[in-house]
Image (tube, rainbow, N blue to C red):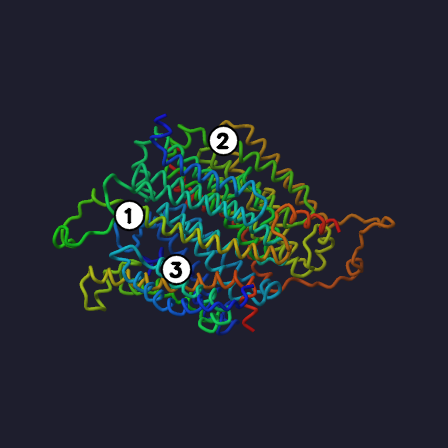
Amino acid sequence: MEFIIGKFNYWIYIVLMMIGFYAMIAKSNLVKKLVGMNIFQTAIILFFISIGSKKGATIPIIQEGATGDAVNQAVNVARYINPLPHVLMLTAIVVMVSTFGVAMALIIMIFRKYKTLEEDEILEIMRSEENK
Amino acid sequence: MIGRFDNVIIQTISRLLIPPIQLFALYVIAHGHYSPGGGFQGGCILGASFILMVIAYDIKEAKRMMSEKVNTIFSSLGVIIYSGIGVVCLILSANYLDYGILNKIMPVTIAEARALGIFGVEVGVGITVMAVMVSIFLNLASGGEHEEAEE
Amino acid sequence: MTAQAPILIIIIPLIASFLNVIIGLWRKRLCYPLVIITLSLSVILSISILNTVITQGVIHYRLGGWEPPWGIEYVIDHLNAFILIIVSFISFTIAIYSKRNVEQEFPEKTVYFYTIYLLLVTGLLGITITGDVFNLYVFLEITSLAVYALIAIGRDKKAPLASFNYLIMGTIGACFYLLGVGYLYIVTGSLNMADLGRLLPDLYHSKVVLAAFAFFTVGVAIKMALFPLHVWLPDAYTYAPSTVSAFAASTMTKVGVYVMIRIMFTVFEPRFSIVMLPSTEILGWVASGAMIFGCILAIAQTDVKRMLSYILIAEVGYIVIGVSVANRAGFTGALLYILFDAFTMACLFMAAGAVMHKTGETSIHGFRHLHRRMPLTMAAFSIAALSAIGVPPFAGFFSKWYLVLGAIDAGKWIFAVLLLLSSLLVAVAFFRIIQNVYFPPYEILIAGSEIALPSARNDKITLMDEAPMSMLLPIVIMAAGILLLGFFSGRIISTIIQFTVPGGF
């Protein structure tokens, strides 16, 4: 029981990832696959950001005035959460948005050529064209 | 694909809101040091202001404000600003993005030179992200005829 | 200048790519010279880097002047420099080849094609040169996005769907790689490859590191099209434009193998990847499956580009077997195979593209009597085919020799037998085409059948209608490389490859 309740945050990420993964594989509509991809990547980003948090710590912005001249004194690291995963995930979010943009452009090209977005219908059209 | 849909409320509110949105975006870019923000976030908000214009009015209005050619040039300009700052550091014989060396051409201390270098990079990133957001949206909203519609 | 070479080799194509947009919108004819100048600078810089590495040892370059565990560092050792020069040389040659192809297939997209092409080269060079696992993810995604866009502008109607399938599978692979990076960051707190190599040995017993290794391996295997995860490759490379197929086939899979070697032997020590986990045995069996499966399916194809894609899957199997036997001869064979296979695949795909440019189709039937029309192209195709099979004076023989030697040294006789068997199958696949080109069998027209030979090919006199010079020159360069480089393999091994073998082999 401790295994499930104690680590419930990891279970949430895994469930989200698997929902997205299932949608990418099992759904036949191309836009649904794309939504699944988005959920998958968002779950990974959520997982990464959560690993930087610490108990009782605040956001990683140096509080001016709290210790006098905050720029010239040492920072008490334990009071702030780890900002590095946030920065890495900023890059990952940009990658996610770009991939989504390219995928939508591809879907528009496919729609213009086949007039449908269901994968089995597209494969039918391709097969019938090959047999002609 | 998005036709003209004249709704007085939406048009009035968007006309009132778009300049403050852009001002806020510039604020977000500039305050990346000291509060949540930075290049990507500010660029997204700037792009969102143009998208709001497309939603409230028509694609042709948005293209009057930001034509496709200007958009493409902006997207390259941002990356060239970013890489250009790095190349300036290279020319001044330091490693690639070593902003501290910029204090040789500007009258600031090394720490301030680093802060200004990062700020320049963020501005470049913001410009590129804005151009790319607008470009993606216009391509999708016009159903892929964005470029041919220019003629 | 040479001290800054590691970063210049990345930012020159990057800045040129974005300058290309601005210049191309002004004058379209200036795009092609800009690309050629940029890539030739890349080749010169990569030769200078190789020189520096051979004479002075490993290069460390700190981005932004920050010390390694806190900043990004570019580390170039012999393995890096080797792959760097392969990628830059092939990108330069294929850029020369691309001019006629772009003019014929999509002239209105010239500017954007060259922009994305330069971005693709930047991404590949960045993957090769970086010493930081997250920076590798960024460059991996730059490469992948550029390839998805380039494949989709092919002329065939099926190109966007092939690119979409590649996008879905490639994103899964990159996300798995990102998860692996995340797990390693959680347990060690560092993202630098050398630093991870130092910190990880204390943690080899933990499950997180094991999961990270599994995610890395599967993610990279999707990207380099290793056997069960290769499904995206035939469609994507068949329907892509000729330039893109040639470039992607010769470089992207090889860079994927490079990433796998880095992760298995630099981030994780050889004793973890080989002794503690049976990963090399699993990879060996998977790779033998790739070899046999790729060759058998290649024999079943009627379209030349599709057949070459299946041969490419088999070639990836060869390289991974060389890595998996985990001894000096096998690893040497794998790296030599990377070099020669890059040249072979580039030559084969470029020749198929030249045939497509002249005749408009790439079916095997369309190759009949083609040696009368395009003798030089077909000679280059035959040379590359013989090298892929592994016939002695050509380059492929030397690399296959080391692979078989490595398999025998490791005592894995079954791999040696499978290597030779698959060479036989590749021979069957290629001899069909070569037979059709030089000695086609007589065709009997059955009444009511659909076979109709174009009358021009039945004439006694066929005019020589060779591919244009800008396409022919790269093909001839690649073929000459295949002919000559085989004899230099001893020198290549003694100066470069012998230093790349990981310690303990």
- The answer to whether residue C17 is left or right of residue B95 is right
- The residue located at (46%, 42%) in the rendering is C220
**Closest to the observer: C393 or B99?**
B99
The circle drawn on residue C282 is 2
CA–CA distance in space, label 2 to label 3: 45 Å
Q: Amino acid at mark 1?
A: Pro
- The residue located at (56%, 47%) in the rendering is C165
Q: Which residue is mark 1?
A: A83
- The answer to whether residue A116 is left or right of residue C66 is right
CA–CA distance in space, label 1 to label 2: 38 Å
Number of other residues with Cα within 10 Å of mark 1, as a class: few under 14, some 14 to 19, many 20 or more: some
Chain letter of mark 3 equals B
Horizontal and vertical percent position of residue B68: 48, 69
CA–CA distance in space, label 1 to label 3: 21 Å
Quarter holding the N terminus of chain B is bottom right
Horizontal and vertical percent position of residue A39: 46, 45
**Closest to the observer: B143 or C419?**
B143
Q: Which residue is mark 3?
A: B44
Quadrant in the picture for residue C268: top left
Q: Secondary structure at mark 1?
A: loop
Chain letter of mark 2 equals C
Name of the residue lying farthest toward the left: A68
Work out whether residue C475 can be spotted. no
